[in-house]
Image (spheres, helix red, strand yellow):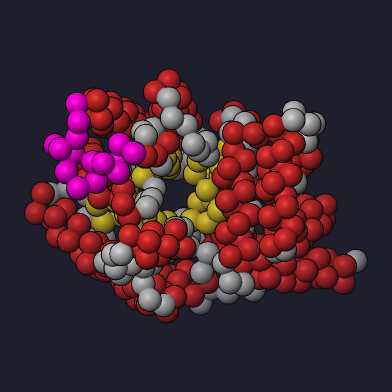
Amino acid sequence: MISFDNTEIAFKSKSNRDLKRAYWLFKAVGNRVFVKFGKWATKVAFKLHLPIKGIIKKTIFHQFCGGETVEGSIATSNALGEYNVKTILDYSIEGKTLDKDFDATVREIIETIQAGQSNKNIPFAVFKMTGICLFSVMEKANDNPSKLASADLEKYKQFISRVDQICNAAHRCKVPVFIDAEESWIQDTIDRIAKEMMLRYNKESAIVYNTVQMYRHDRLAFLESEIAAARADQHFLGVKIVRGAYMEKERNRAKENGYPSPIQETKEASDTDFDKALHLAVEHLDIVAICSGSHNEKSALVLTELMAEKGLSNNHPSIYFAQLLGMSDHISFNLAHAGYNVGKYVPYGPVQEVMPYLLRRADENTSVAGQTSRELALITRERNRRKEKK
């Protein structure tokens, strides 16, 4: 049995100064009023060209991001690697709409793949499809891309070409790539293209991974069908299992447009399906490779227990755990200390460009029940332990 209560292991990589900074940061993001004001003030400050970049770099950026470039993030990757925690470089630029920006993003993602080819601490790359295509085109293509107007169809073909460039580079460099899940009204587009890439590049091993969000009530059945298809088509299935990140948006849109919400009715139902997905994937490890992307201690324990029951080694090559940089270190570092494969999502990019990501992260910390209080409790416990040790 593994325990996530060991804060000495969890925060061994953090100095007293790091812990103090993290403590006050989580105090801040736990305050809804402060977060709301901070979002407004940050946008105004950047618009007025006020000198706030330094403050951001020393606080929220330092906590949740690895650097401004791939090269600038290597120091963070190396520091994590000292504790057997790997890095998943995540180019966290959002909201682009021009082809030149989409093409630049493709080049950046390929650079993260190439970094993984030469660095044992970087086992995966990752990207969001909305980072390389207009959301509107993906939405129109969701039901049937053959019905797209000529202009949109051309953009859709360019989009598939960009995805193929990324997946081809991943296959060539032997660095698997995660395709993130997104909103349900573009997810069919994502699933369809991810499947196409798996058929092309997952013949020898799982190079392309799709993501399933288990807060959707239909995703367990989807995973079952993908496993069956992988057997029938004789390719490996790469799958990242997460709970999901768009719940409020999904429910609101369903209500506004008068269709049944795709979201589970209760958190318990999401938790149940998440654990069932882990069981299902482990039962088919001969053709499935999984990454459990979760900040939930119980789900992490479920997977470690499944591995033990199956007699699998802690570092089984087809099983990874993943958490976000700056969060849930008690899970990441204790798992890594016990010899499990663990990756931290390490977002990076120019400070101003990653602010939408950082502000969304602050929002999520205030909305996820218990997340901020849990981080604060763990940090406080470790700070007290260090004081008592002196």
Q: Position of residue 167 (x, y in %)?
A: 31, 34
Q: Residue sitting at 52 percent across and 71 percent down? A: 297
In terms of image quadrants, where is residue 375? bottom right
Question: Above or below — where is 121 with respect to 301?
Answer: above
Q: Is residue 52 magenta?
A: no
Question: Above or below — where is 361 with respect to 221?
Answer: above
Q: Which residues are magenta?
A: 136-150
Residue 126 appears in the picture as rendered: yes
Q: Nearer the viewer, residue 374 or 384?
A: 374
Q: Residue sitting at 62 percent across and 31 percent down? A: 350
Q: Residue sitting at 61 percent across and 61 percent down? A: 365
Q: Please state if 91 lies on the left or on the right of 277 as rendered.
A: right
Q: Please state if 326 lies on the left or on the right of 343 as rendered.
A: right
Q: Nearer the viewer, residue 250 or 323?
A: 250
Q: Kindly report the secondary structure that dominates the magenta region of the rendered protein.
A: helix
Q: Position of residue 155 (x, y in %)?
A: 28, 27
Residue 333 appears in the picture as rendered: no
